Amino acid sequence: MDNHNRLFAKVDRNGDGRIDREEFVTFMYNHLPMDPAALRTELEELLGAARHLYQHRIEKRGRLWENPDSYVEKEDDAKARLAKLFQEMDVTGDGVMSKSELFQMRQMRRELGLAEHEVTVDEHEWLFNKLDGNSDGTIDVHEFSTFFWNRLPLETSAQSKWFTEQFAAAKAVRERRREKMQQISMAPHEFEEAKTRSKQRLHQLYMQMRKPGCDYVGLEQINKLCKARSARGVRSSADGSSLFSAMDVDNDSQINEFEFVNYLWNHLPMVAEAREKAIDDLGDAVLDM
């Protein structure tokens, strides 16, 4: 999104937040290739993208004018499903979605193989701010439904597939939260003992990751850890920078022991066997750094 903003600022020479014809033509003339063959290819690609966007808008408008009653029914149905999806994603049940809840949902999509790209901090900030129409720091059901209604696939089967994937991710997030609460409530003393053991192991990993003479873990070590895990075939829902930012609670550009241990503990599986395996995998990756 930063690249998009920089490009827009370059084209928008007078800084009025809009690109007029003269600004567009001037920018394209100065940046298109001079070679005739390359120029032709570039223009064909640009025209193809413009036609695709134009056709998308025409199809959406056409459905409204050809059969407005049907269109309104589809809009009402889709927004009702979006409202239901919002309820599923609101795992705390407080009627609004926080930045953390949205991030968990997007991470889960990545874990389930429903999202191709890793979740980055800048991109997530941009998406959350777009959804948060009134800038109050949370997303309500109206903001959520309005935003995604304008971006749903037009084709019925594609739209159904989109909803199916979103509900699957929301269900997985809820299941993970349920497991965590169940572990705590069923045997609190056993849970606390397991928690202590796991945190001791995470403390050992933290000590192994620190550079000699340093009392913190930096971005370099987190990037190395992510690369080592990736080399072992571990699928990650966030890149090194995003993970570092999430761990760095006090925003001092370094991760202390408390931040490291508590972040990983809160993101470990709650089932004992899976939790121990996850820590073992982390340990192997640290050794590979």
Image (cartoon, helix red, strand yellow):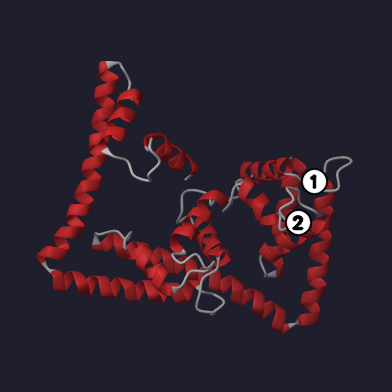
Mark closer to the observer (2, 1)? 2
Give how far across and how far down residue 282 sits, in percent.
72, 52
- Of mark 2 and mark 1, the one earlier in the sequence is 1
Give how far across and how far down residue 250 sits, in percent.
73, 57
Provide the residue designation for mark 1: 209
Q: Residue at x 71, y 58 (%)?
A: 249
Q: Residue furthest right?
A: 213
Q: Is residue 120 visible?
A: no
Q: Residue at x 45, y 56 (%)?
A: 114
* Mark 2 element type: helix
Q: Residue at x 25, y 36 (%)?
A: 21
* Mark 1 element type: helix
Residue 59, picture quadrant: bottom left
Under mark 1, the amino acid is Met
Q: Label 1 neighbourhood size at 10 Å, few (<14), some (14-19), many (20+)?
A: many
Residue 260 numbered tag: 2
User: Closer to the camera, 250 or 211?
Assistant: 250
- Quarter of the image that includes the C terminus: top right
Would residue 267 be found to the left or right of residue 159 on screen?
A: right
Q: CA distance from mark 2 to mark 1?
A: 11 Å
Q: Residue furthest bottom?
A: 186
Under mark 2, the amino acid is Phe
